Image: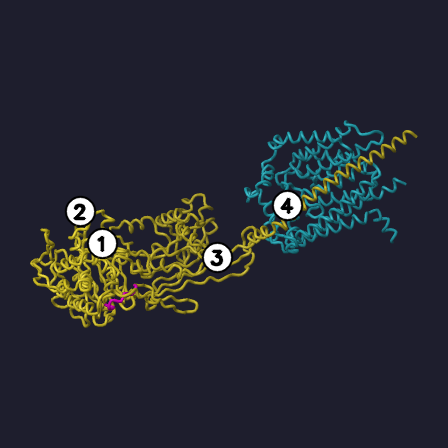
Chain colours: A cyan, B yellow
Amino acid sequence: MKKICRHLFGHMDGFLLLIITALLIIGLAILYSASDQNMERVMYQVINIIVALIVMWVFSLIPPQQLSRFALPIYVLGLILLLAVSIHGEVRLGARRWLNLGITSIQPSELMKIAVPMMLAWYLDKPEAELRLKDFAVASLFLVLPVILILKQPDLGTALIIFASGFFVLFLAGLSWRIMGGFMLAFTAMIPVIWRHMHDYQRQRILTLFHPAQYRLGAGYHIIQSTIAMGSGGFFGQGWLHGTQAKLDFLPERSTDFIFAVFSEEFGFAGILMLVLLFVLLIWRCLVISVNAPTLFTRLLAGSITLTFFTYAFINMAMVSGILPVVGIPLPLISYGGTSIVTLLLGFGILMSINIHRKLVQT
Amino acid sequence: MHKIQSALKNYVVELKKFKIRLAIATGFMLAALVILIVRFGWLQIHQYAYYRTLAENNRVSVVPIAPNRGLILDRNGVVLAKNLPGYSLEITPSKIKSLKKVFSRLSRVVTVSPSDIRRFNKLRVESRRFESLPIRARLSEEEAARFAANQFAFPGVKIHARLYRYYPFANLYSHVIGYVGRINDANLNALEKAGELDDYRGSEHIGKTGVELSYEKVLHGTPGSDRIETDAGGHAVRDLGRTLPVPGDNVYLTIDSKLQQIANQAFGNYRGALVAIRPQTGAVLAMVSKPGFDPNLFVDGIDTINWQKLSDSPDHPLINRAIHSAYPPGSTFKPFVALAGLTLDPIVANQDVFDPGYYKLPGSSHIYHDWKRGGFGVVSLDRAITVSCDTFFYNLAYSLGIDPLAHYVEQFGFGHKTGIDMPGEGKGLIPTEAWKRKFYHKPWYPGETVISGIGQGYVLVTPLQLASAVATLANNGVIMRPHVVRSVQDPETGLIHLVHPVEEGRVNASQADLDRIRQDMITVTQPGGTAPGVGFNSPYLIAAKTGTAQVIGLKAGPDAGKRRDNAVFIAYAPADNPQIAVAVLVENGGEGGVTAGPIARKVMDYFILGKVPATPAPVLTGSTPGGNKSE
């Protein structure tokens, strides 16, 4: 029995699993409060989590070499689906993000969150020679293509995350500083053009950041109410289930993108420090796995997954506390939502697989 | 071998490069983390109190509960101003696109008259700080029910259950009680300045005139509040507790409602004023200013047409003649001039004067007529009062000089406010040489002193001053400050706090002189006096003085019929034990003894005997001729 267990789960990283579980439980607890103690909603999320854990388990079983073989097909499939969405996609809430497959609708952009870094890492892992500028150029093309398609949906949050995950691969692979600097300059120069091509609501979200009071009832409402929630939490918080901002409907999107505001209101600065500590431990573990990864592909993939996870958390916390404009990025492992949790745990599954198969390769 | 080595070297270099890059990324992450933590600390620790307040304000809305306004009652407890429950229909203009459309649609459900719409528009200009304003007050039960059933069709229109100020006696107390009206921008500014804005949270009305204004603080009360937890949509979630409002105190007037009614009726269609005072306390027993108006019109804002009707009326119904308007006192001034003479220059005052029917200043050819052609012959001070001889007082005033005379009569309250507990009191006017220099830049002429002696010329008094002065005579020269509020009652405990009479001092006159003048005033209502009709058949003695004051400054023209003199009458009774002092002024009433006297008699009869005049009292004319300057 014990043997079977070890055989089935032995490859999973205990430390990683422990922290992930802790975060998921915190997420459920805060969801219970944010959803006005709606047990049904919580159970739904529990099912999401179970599915995600199974996905993680499955991916932790797949050896990285196997995974790298799928990089190209998955990427191509994702790209085709994205194109299909842009032609045939369902429009929900003003954005064309979903593809109706008859039985269920899927968001191909979610698939790309894993497919893009995998593709880039696979492409850049060339054992025979040092990477050249040409390699980076081609890799950038692989990155930019899906990002543009997703931006057009429009889904700024996801595009940003996918761009970040791909960029992290390029960065870790040693993209020269000069080129990055050049692109930064070009980007800065492009800001007016980008500004003109933005949607009105996106522009307003950015303006809101600087003058929230001016948009008190419009776009500023989110930021004002979430900073009030956070600020009124104080050091120790209002206590679980006692956040008035959340309970009385002042906080919008409070079980998804703004769940961190509910958490801050109820658990205060002390609670935030605990949460941040869990995130830091998780990332630290992931960094260790990345450094010890056996191949360039696994290193780049693990590093990118780690940094992307951090990016998720940072953007969400910064947005809720009013230092970044509002973009639709949930707090990883805490926010309500099935797809996001499945994608995240899939990533951790890959990390676990990389960790366990390191020894196999070395020996 | 070489190939493997190179591959290994590559591998090592590659790993080193990766580690450096990862370290840099970690550095970035740490920096980002520090920024976040600083931000959280700023919000949650440094700004905690600020955001806590914001969250609390988000959560708790404090709904003020307006206090019930105190009642106003007469001295016997008859309610003169009360609060009636009712429904009002209120519109929030900011929520409505086209008011016109709403008016026309509303009028299919409840009655909305053009005057309601005019009133509403006037309120919109005056009360910009209010969110919602009433379009209709006092809906009937049926209208309220009908609107409630159609409420869904009228967003921005709401029905409110509240209390209305109601004045059951309408015109009878228009000037004494005054009225409350909706709080306007001017009121708000004044309240803000006085720091009393908090007391008016939830209130819509405030005293505007009369006792409603002067006792506003007493009547208003203190608002309570309801602390309600509300969600983001403004829906009440639960009650967090309430502070009950403290109702305003009830105010009991010194006025006797029945007496007030009798006095009011006694005027008939005349314009004028009456003030009745209890001499020993200064308590005002009746105060009439005719014509009056219906104060109920003002409670929820008066519409423009009604307002113009009242404010443009040549009868000036909005003016409180009793305390504000100044009239020449005419011969009712004589007892006070006589006292001035007896006190300041007894030798001249006690000298008989020969009255040929006119008076001439030494070295002047100008003739000052006595009201009686041919004159009264040799006249003493006493007889001069009885028959109201002008020549005697021309001479006396001239001998005293205007400044000493003015200075003396001012003791009785003439020329300055009596300090009654009502707003809008007038000062009247007692002229002096300095006054004339200041306002006319001209010297004082001796002739002006002469006519001042009979209460003409520049001399102007308010009916209240006259009443107070005659009350002072009745009270042996002790001046009591007139007041209309007798007591204030806490409605919750029932405890009554009496308003104590205030003694203002004593006039400078000997008891003998006072007695003498009072005796002379009794003769006025006796056969041979100027008002024997007033004293006719009276079981009690009446001391009085008549006056027929020439009205100056009336323009000729369509108003020519109104150029009759004002009738003035002052009295107190019973003369041997004064209980009531009265001053009556009838505009264009002609002779004081004929028009004003009987009004005073009815009031005194009711007060002393409890007699209600069933039919108009018989008018007996004594030796009172007409057409002259004064009686």
Same subunit, labels 1 and 2: the answer reads: yes
> In the displayed structure, would residue B495 be above or below residue A170?
below
Q: Of marks 3 and 2, which one's residue comes earlier in the chain?
A: 3
Disc 2 marks which residue? B557
Q: Residue at x 87, y 53 (%)?
A: A2
**Subunit that carries the residue with mark 2:** B
Q: Residue at x 16, y 64 (%)?
A: B346
Q: How far apart are the alpha carbons under marks 4 and 3?
A: 34 Å
Same subunit, labels 3 and 2: the answer reads: yes
Viewer-closest of B583 and A290: B583
- Residue B521 at x, y percent in the picture: 17, 66
Left or right of A348, for residue A159:
left
Disc 1 marks which residue? B432
Viewer-closest of B209 and A203: B209
Q: Residue B64 shows which numbered tag? A: 3
Sort mark 1 into few (<14), some (14-19) or many (20+) by Cα contacts within 10 Å: many
Q: Amino acid at mark 3?
A: Pro
Disc 4 marks which residue? A321
Left or right of B531, for residue A250:
right
**Subunit that carries the residue with mark 4:** A
Image quarter of residue B56: bottom right
Image quarter of residue B68: bottom left
Query: Can residue B421 be seen here?
Result: yes
